[in-house]
Image (cartoon, helix red, strand yellow):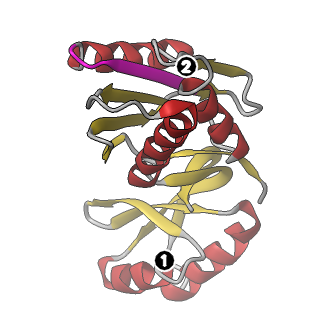
Amino acid sequence: MSVRYKTVLNEAQAMIVIEKSKFIGYIRPVETQEEAEAFVTSIRVMNRDATHNVPAYVLGEKFEIQKYSDDGEPSGTAGVPVVQMLVKEGITNVAIVMTRYFGGIKLGTGGLVRAYTGIAKEALSAAGVAEVKDMDVMKATIQYTHHGKAENAGQKGLFSIRSTEFTDKVTLEVVCDPSDTEEVKKNFMEITAGTVEFSGEHTELVKVPV
């Protein structure tokens, strides 16, 4: 199944110190420009005493929206290279704010580019990258006696279990590649001796960790 786009899994932050300047990278997945701007504002408020709060965000499957600012750093040394890095890596629907507390030693233009792209990559690593794909989602209701075998089958990678509901039976919310759906159903039929009940089958965009 082709990947629609890549984004980040979770909200996260990272920190590095370069020549006594402290750089903190804040990152989160976003779906809209309003959400991105609200995130940027919240970080600026939280770090209002910082020397710089550099925002950069990219939105849209084709990177239609690209916003950034150098926030007082020399032009082209902070927000621009980070947005370029995100697009080059194919990562979108993400907002990053890179906060700098100046340590008294100037880094030069090349040093600033390396510092800001460096902290952005650290934040990306902390957040984790995911591919967003069209995946089939369905519920499989089974007997308790078959629960262990179903979980073991999910761990083999053909499908994943997103949630589990325990009532008089066990209902698993199963996620799989559309090309594997029939094989997944066959597996459940074998595991449960044909007693599985499928419901709510649909396709949705799902984040899959890289």
In this picture, residue 78 sits left or right of residue 125: right
Is residue 164 visible in the rendered structure shown here?
A: yes
- Give percent across and percent down for residue 128: 46, 54
Badge 2 is on which residue?
32
Q: Is residue 53 magenta?
A: yes
Q: Which numbered circle lies on residue 129?
A: none
The N terminus appears in which quarter of the rendering?
bottom right
Position of 17 relative to 208 (above/below): above
Q: Earlier in the sequence, mark 2 or mark 1?
A: 2
Q: Say which element carries label 2.
A: loop
Dominant SS in magenta? strand
Identify the residue shown where x is 33% and y is 32%.
Answer: 105
Q: Say which element carries label 1.
A: helix
- Give percent across and percent down for residue 175: 55, 60
Q: Which numbered circle lies on residue 154?
A: 1
Q: Which residues are magenta?
A: 49-57
The C terminus appears in which quarter of the rendering?
bottom right
Position of 74 relative to 24 (above/below): above
Residue in front for this viewpoint, 131 or 158: 131
Q: Is residue 122 magenta?
A: no
Amino acid type at circle 2 is Thr
Residue in front for this viewpoint, 146 or 64: 64
